[in-house]
Image (cartoon, rainbow, N blue to C red):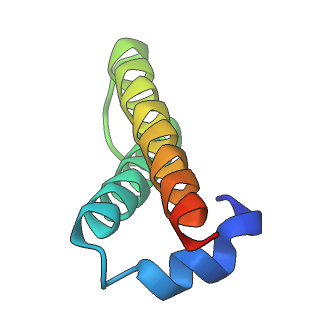
């Protein structure tokens, strides 16, 4: 996710608690969705779609946070 921000992510992950929570929640949802789609965990298509929307919202928040930090460093 966001290879262009890989260095910044490495730098702030663990130091910026808000970012770390967003990042970890995104990864957790990603794994849950994969498990549901692989039928390891039972779920309806509606449940999967709801989680995908939540994951996308988190991704947008992560991107906005990275952009703010990038602007602050400039």
In the rendered image of this protein, does residue 40 appear above or below residue 27? above
Q: Examine the image and state in which quarter residue 14 appears.
A: bottom left
- The picture places residue 7, in percent across and down from the top left corner, at 65, 82
Q: Examine the image and state in which quarter residue 73 appears.
A: bottom right
In the rendered image of this protein, does residue 66 appear above or below residue 58? below
- The picture places residue 42, in percent across and down from the top left corner, at 31, 34
- The picture places residue 18, in percent across and down from the top left corner, at 25, 62
- Residue drawn at 40 percent across, 52 percent down: 26
Judged left or right of residue 48, residue 69 is: right
- Residue drawn at 37 percent across, 12 percent down: 46
- Residue reaching furthest to the right: 4
Dividing the image into 4 quarters, which one contains the C terminus? Answer: bottom right
- Residue drawn at 32 percent across, 69 percent down: 20
Depth check: give the residue in front, 52 or 65: 65
- Residue reaching furthest to the top: 46
Q: Examine the image and state in which quarter residue 41 appears.
A: top left
Depth check: give the residue in front, 35 or 61: 61
- Residue drawn at 43 percent across, 80 percent down: 12
Dividing the image into 4 quarters, which one contains the N terminus? Answer: bottom right
Depth check: give the residue in front, 3 or 49: 3
């Amino acid at each position: 996710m966001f290879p262009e921000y890989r260095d910044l992510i490495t730098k702030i992950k663990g130091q910026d608690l808000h970012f770390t929570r967003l990042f970890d929640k995104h990864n957790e949802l990603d794994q849950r969705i994969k498990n549901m789609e692989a039928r390891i965990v039972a779920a309806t298509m509606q449940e999967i779609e709801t989680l995908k929307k939540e994951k996308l919202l988190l991704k947008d928040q992560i991107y906005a946070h990275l952009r703010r930090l990038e602007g602050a460093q400039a």
